[in-house]
Image: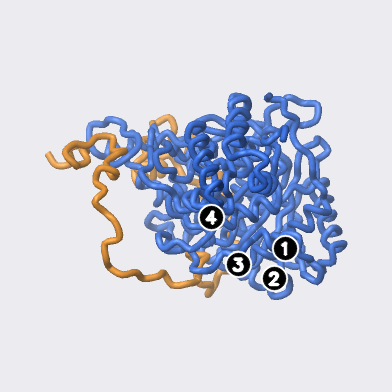
Chain colours: A blue, B orange
Amino acid sequence: MSDLNGLTLKGALDALAAKQFSAEELARAQVAAIEAANPALNAYVLTTPEKAIEMAKASDARRARGEAGPLEGASIGVKDLFATEGVRTTAASKILGGFVPPYESTVTANLWRDGAVMLGKLNLDEFAMGSSNETSALGPVVNPWRSRGSNKPLTPGGSSGGSAAAVAADLCLAATATDTGGSIRQPAAFTGTVGIKPTYGRCSRWGVVAFASSLDQAGPIAKTVEDAAILLTSMAGHDPKDSTSLPVETPDFASFVGKSVKGLKVGVPEDYRIDGMPAEIAALWDQGIEWLKAAGAEVKSVRLPHTKYALPAYYIIAPAEASSNLARYDGMRFGLREPGDSLAEVYENTRASGFGDEVKRRILIGTYVLSAGYYDAYYLRAQKVRRRIADDFDAAFKDVDALLTPTAPSAAFGLGERTDDPVAMYLNDVFTVTTNLAGLPGLSLPAGLSSDGLPLGLQLIGRALDEGTLFSLAGALEQAAGFKAKPEKWWA
Amino acid sequence: MSIDAATVRRVAKLARIAEPEHRLEPLARELSSILNWIEQLNEVDVEGVEPMASAVAAKLPMREDVVADGGDAAKVLSNAPKSADGFFIVPKVVE
């Protein structure tokens, strides 16, 4: 095997099982690739090469004993929002200081249970609040992709920008990520990778740094649809430590990839045809419709009339929940503590110095909409609009099995291009945020290139707990699209 | 709806974030532009609509009222900015 780094998760698992190379050899190749690329891409905020080699050796020993798990020896990157025992966890914020969790998140514990090897912690927007990875206190991630004929650094999207960039640049076989309004799917679309936000409650939130608890959900970013299915199968599962974790069986999601989609009904929501949608994104969407028809699916138009209200509702609900969740960062029990003349001043100085501008902005918005006199006008109204949006989906899913939409309203844009206007940045999530509000699964896969040679994604939305249908449809689209493009390794 | 510098000062106080005086006006403008954009929610007819707080319809599960784990004082204190003798050390609250 010449290039172990270029393997898919499935390819690596098969080769490991066939003893073509060891987990240790794979981990060493990945560690070397990360060392070479990370100064340019900043995808990892912490690499754990010694831990990776140690875990890989233990994996090889397990395999030799005949105890190989479903992810045995697979080298994985972890978004730095998941608490990892004994390994610094930052949420890309200064306020956590040098926080070293004395516990492991359930999702990552599930991966290690299944034999995976950790390569390090991946960059993100601070507390997962952002769509370009530029709010990270540890610096932005640079997208491995560049526009044709240009050296301009592009965003990998956000908030899971490190996860998406690392997968696209072959700096891990696959990565964990989280999605509160589109943070798995938009970066996946910007980097030519596959990402799925499963049904709310599929993956435990225990040990994941909280942003907006009623919306946050973990999921994988991977190189192929099958890889995403394999990783999600290990990540998911009921966890009594998260009261919103669903007490349901986790299917073998990979078994749905490659299934026929003949006879499945797919809806095309006309309300997603927003003003100003670039022609090439509209064209890719139409192409996706044709691919699904050719694969035997029945495609029909549906209405989701409250779509345009999803983002404004989200920007009440998510900041409100964040302002409450982030109240814990007070400098008393862990993380940063700044001096002050009184207890109140210690709180205020700690939070002023520890939080970045976007996080402060959202805490202030959240505090405002929850404050006396405004609660009904903002928060309660947003929760009612949320119900309307969920009802739209319920009605649509009476007629169809899944929905097809674009993932994001543009291809990756330049770093620094959209940092001046918060609302313009928020619009990145216009197609993804609806599923967070409704708790539904959404999957993004790469389906083509823009005229500048940048990846574009299509999104599939499914019924609650019906990720299987999404994996079948995504498998069909992946085959039809034949997306094989990779970024040039300009950083090597 | 527009908010002014005085409102930002009040909200920042509620949120326990020190905002210097010169940041209040720019923040008022930024937050107003976000809130003005959010105003479009007033177009939605929400008469009689039940507010939705969670995507999970199920009732929160109950568990046995027993100790599940504990005795980890050292772990709990391991990230404390200041601690001594098994306690967090915090600024003086009562004079």
Q: Earlier in the sequence, mark 4 or mark 1?
A: 4
**Residues under numbered marks 2 and 1 in contact, where contact means CB atoms less than 8 Å apart:** yes
Which amino acid type is shown beneath numbered disc 2? Ala
Q: CA distance from mark 4 to mark 3?
A: 13 Å
Q: Earlier in the sequence, mark 2 or mark 1?
A: 2
**Residues under numbered marks 3 and 2 in contact, where contact means CB atoms less than 8 Å apart:** no
| Circle 1 SS class | strand
Q: CA distance from mark 4 to mark 1?
A: 20 Å
Q: CA distance from mark 2 to mark 1?
A: 9 Å
The residue that label 3 is drawn on is: A464
Which amino acid type is shown beneath numbered disc 1? Leu
The residue that label 4 is drawn on is: A217
Q: Chain of mark 3?
A: A
Q: Earlier in the sequence, mark 1 or mark 3?
A: 1
Which amino acid type is shown beneath numbered disc 4? Gln
Which amino acid type is shown beneath numbered disc 3? Ala
Q: Chain of mark 2?
A: A
Q: Nearer the viewer, mark 2 or mark 1?
A: 1
Q: Indicate whether A28 appears above or below A405.
A: above
